[in-house]
């Protein structure tokens, strides 16, 4: 099944045709967008006629302020909708990635940070938590046995007392 290969001149010709068609489409879109903009401006922004009296000028200012407020409310509503849609898109992307099951864990960098700095980073600078882990540990005091202190004393004296027959007798007397 041999496929006929396209010659380089034919490829170049088709590519140039596609680029010229795309350029004409972009020009048409730009002209259409400009026309749409002009139509919108004519509908929502009529020609400004400046009144001659102060009262008419004040009425015009009030009318413009009302229109500005309406446009700001509309802009705020649209912005809220866009942010909500962006969040939904991000959540759906995460769900798609989870469903694919090909989630690669990023390589984490080692960070040397104390417990206090970590809590401050998590909770923010408003919450100052001092976490001294050693202060929360129980204090354990080692009790030194008194017998060991006596044994540590003069060892020569103990050996001399227990030396010979008398020493054995003392050992038996101490155990009994």
Image: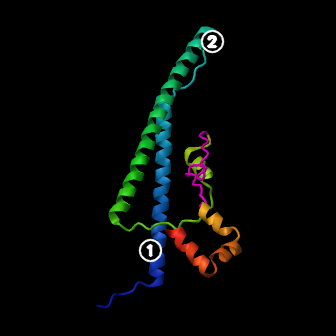
> Over which residues does the magenta segment extend?
126-145
- State the mark number for residue 52: 2
Residue 100 pos. (x, y %): 34, 65
Q: Is residue 13 magenta?
A: no
The outermost residue toward the bottom is 2
Quick one: label 2, few (<14), some, or many (20+) residues within 10 Å? Answer: few
**Residue at the spot 54% in from the left edge and 68% down from the top edge:** 174
Which corner quadrant of the image does residue 7 belong to? bottom left
Answer above or below: position of 59 versus 120.
Answer: above
Question: 135 or 7: nearer the eye?
Answer: 135
Real-space CA distance between mark 2 and mark 1, rounded to the nearest whole angstrom: 64 Å
- State the mark number for residue 14: 1
- Left or right: where 132 falls relative to 17: right
Q: How many marks?
A: 2
Please report whichever mark, 2 or 1, sits nearer to the chain's N-terminal start.
1
Residue 105 pos. (x, y %): 46, 66
Q: Main secondary structure of the magenta part?
A: loop
Which corner quadrant of the image does residue 51 belong to? top right
Q: Quadrant of the N terminus?
A: bottom left
Residue 148 pos. (x, y %): 61, 66
- Left or right: where 156 falls relative to 94: right
């Amino acid at each position: 099944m041999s496929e006929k290969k396209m010659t380089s001149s034919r490829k170049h010709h088709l590519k140039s045709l596609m680029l010229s068609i795309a350029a004409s489409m972009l020009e048409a879109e730009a002209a259409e967008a400009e026309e749409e903009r002009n139509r919108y401006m004519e509908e929502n922004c009529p020609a400004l006629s400046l009144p001659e009296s102060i009262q008419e000028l004040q009425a015009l200012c009030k009318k413009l302020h009302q229109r500005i407020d309406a446009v700001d409310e509309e802009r705020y509503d649209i912005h809220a909708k866009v942010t909500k849609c962006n969040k939904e898109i991000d959540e759906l992307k995460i769900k798609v990635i989870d469903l694919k099951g090909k989630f690669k864990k990023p390589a984490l960098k080692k960070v040397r940070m104390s417990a206090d700095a970590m809590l401050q980073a998590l909770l923010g600078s408003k919450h100052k938590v001092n976490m001294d882990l050693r202060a929360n540990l129980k204090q354990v005091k080692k009790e030194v046995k008194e017998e060991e202190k006596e044994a540590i004393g003069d060892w020569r004296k103990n050996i001399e007392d227990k030396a010979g027959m008398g020493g054995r007798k003392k050992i038996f007397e101490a155990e009994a």
